[in-house]
Amino acid sequence: MTGLIPFREIVLKVHSRCDLACDHCYVYEHADQSWRARPKVISPEAVSHTASRLADHARAHALPSVTVILHGGEPLLAGTDRLRLVCEEFTRALAGTAALDLRIHTNGLQLSRRHLDLFDEFHVRVGVSLDGDRAANDRHRRFADGRTSHPLVLAAVDLLRSERYRHLYLGLLCTVDVANDPVAVLDALVALEPPRVDFLLPHATWETPPARPDGTPDAYARWLLRVFDHWDRLGRPVPVRLFESLLSTLRGGPSLTESLGLAPTDLVVVETDGTLEQVDSLKTAYDGAAATGFDVFTHSFDQVAAHPGVRARQLGLAGVSDTCRRCPVVRSCGGGLYTHRYRAANGFDNPSVYCADLRELVEGVEARTAAEATAAALTDTGELGAVHDHLTRVLLARLHADLAGDADWDRAWALLTAVEGAGAAGEAALDAVLGHPYTRTWVLTALDRATAGRPDRPGAARRLAALAAAAVLRGGLELPAEIRYRDGEVYLPTLGLLRAREPGTDGRAGLRATGEGYTVREDGREHRFGTAAGDARWQPVRGWAPAPDAAPLALEDLDPHRNCFARPPRLRLGSGEAAEWRERLGAAWALLHRSVPEFARSATAGLTTLTPLAGGPRAGDRGEAGRHGPGALGLPYAAGVRETALALLTGRRRARLRALTEVADLYALDGAWQHPSPWRERPVPVSRLLADVHERVAVEAYRRATEPGRAPASDRIHRALDRLSGAAELTSSGKRLVEELRWELKAVDA
């Protein structure tokens, strides 16, 4: 079925009754009372059919793994014989089809060595429900006669966390009650050393709202934030799924729990009579809310997955209310648990009954963790460069995994490895050639071809050999470098173009540095090439020092991989053209630093390479960022001084934003919302609006400084920033960047 989202998790009700009488239980105490008509224990036939249906479903959708959660009621009441049958049937059915993750959620009262030995045999992990310390747990989790269950649960957890069974310990589930002491609750849970803690909001709807003893709309947020603060002070001693989900979505990652975030549900429930139902929490909404009309004896899991109720919980952003879609925290809260949105008048098309709590919780966690959640690369140019250098090495390693086994590639890779192991000189030389911006361009292009099944092995081996040889020469290393020339020439990254033979010839040769030049050795003969001016066989990469105390920049017009901009690159500049371009660059550089010094310093930080681009001047000329590593910028060669200054400024702004988005998540779900832009006729995704603002703040500063009397245009930028501030797509890093832009614009206005 088109667009069907398969089930990866099933909740199997193996027993429908419970030995506790918890007054907050959604199965027995809420609207749906269907448990009364169901058998106490699941039948062998229902177990067998469920296992078979799940195996068919896994095969049909090529699922690598499935999770089966044994549930109730209290699942341990089913007895070890029935639990063994369940484990055996699912293990047999899934063998050779998908990995099986078996779990059980229990109140722990019946848990014994007999159970744990069985679970050890079938790798069943155990989650235990416990609401904290004794006072908290006794508030709801009591026997029918009012007796406490707390000592028995602690004994069960102690057995589970013993050395013999510790590997089966899945974690603790705690239902929140704001009347309990949040610090005491967390301390009690942490003392039991769980692998994970889940905090669950009590199930409620707009028809049956949650208890709020103090009458405030944010009582649950304040309670959970006190837990978060204590958890943070303790050094986050155990994972807490609710908090880790929030931290993930605030950074642009996925939700880690069904109760938060926009991820589609992939869970189905099988009752003790084989009935197939939606998620159990729906029983809180109204009688029959979880029903599908299907069962394992006559229906497939695909039929259930196509049920309108199931599909409604898989719509992501489209499945939340209009109020939620306009909310800036919807990516993190996801509109809350589907059940908690229910209102009799209009079903589930509402914000959560915990809406105020969820917003305050998300914003509270974000405020507390903004510094740690913000990518360091956002504020530190050196850190950004270091992250990108590491990224290039990671991508190169991936390319090696695709091309290893080719003799020429392997020989060049061995030399590169030898350079890396040649001490400080080798490491510095390798950093230089791998940090060359167009090394990234080559790696990405080669990876694209390899991924598409069309690897250019000869071309990749030639470039890798040239990289290794360039590193050997830069480091002055006594290593046997080899080049592979094509059409008589080879480009040595960061150094220059060597014409080793006549045009039209291909081959390989040894290469080493000798005094004021290079020596190429081929077929027992040596050919010397001078690196001094005048030897036409050697064309060096030119440099330009923008200021006496500034590091020289490479004027790169040789690297064949510099063709990564919207405009084509210029061919090799003549000596006169290069001198003229240096002069225009110097004047443009001085103009920038004179008119907008702060923006100029930011624009030139990390800049290493300028590439002249072809074509004449155009209205609104901008510098260009392409598919390359950080540090490169393409500039229109024929642009005048003022245009070149603006191109330097805007191009570096574009390059910086691109570099940031490659290593940090500034936004998520780009395109899910469309935003009005002051500069465009149609609404745009958040990525486009952010890019426009990022560039226009600098342009506004430049034009105010260089065009006296020009009317300010910052009002439109302010409107765009306001729109961005409320954009749900932005992560913590994205919001930090927007605040930086706001401060930059305030400085311009001032």
Image (cartoon, rainbow, N blue to C red):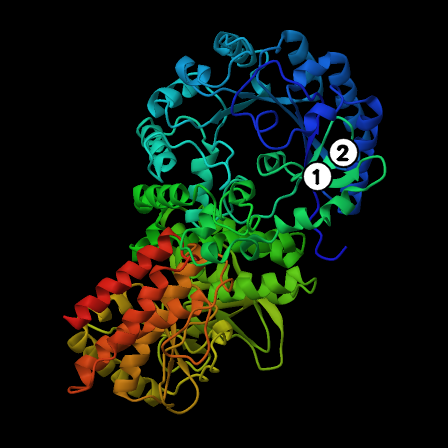
Res. 265 in view: yes
Residue 452 in the image, given as x and y percentages of width and height: 67, 63
Q: Quadrant of the N terminus?
A: bottom right
Give the camera-side residue of 337 and 654: 337
**Percent position of residue 59, x then y:** 79, 43
Circle 2: residue type: Thr
Give the answer, above or below, for where 742 lies relative to 352. below
Compared to residue 199, the image places residue 110 above or below, namely above
Q: Label 1 sits on what residue type?
A: Ala
Q: How many marks?
A: 2
Q: Nearer the viewer, residue 126 or 75?
A: 75
Badge 2 density bin: few <14, some 14–19, many ≥20, Cα 10 Å: many
Query: What is the spatial separation of the Cα atoms under label 1 and label 2, in whole angstroms?
Result: 8 Å
Determine contact: label 1, label 2, CB under 8 Å: yes
Q: Identify residue for label 1.
A: 291
Where does the image place residue 627, in percent across and percent down from the top left? 48, 68
Compare marks 1 and 2 and give the one earlier in the sequence.
2
Q: Describe the element under mark 1 as helix, strand or loop.
A: strand
Image height of 539 relative to 174, above or below: below
Residue at screen point 44% across, 86% down: 614
Q: What residue is rendered at 39% in x and 21% in y?
A: 185
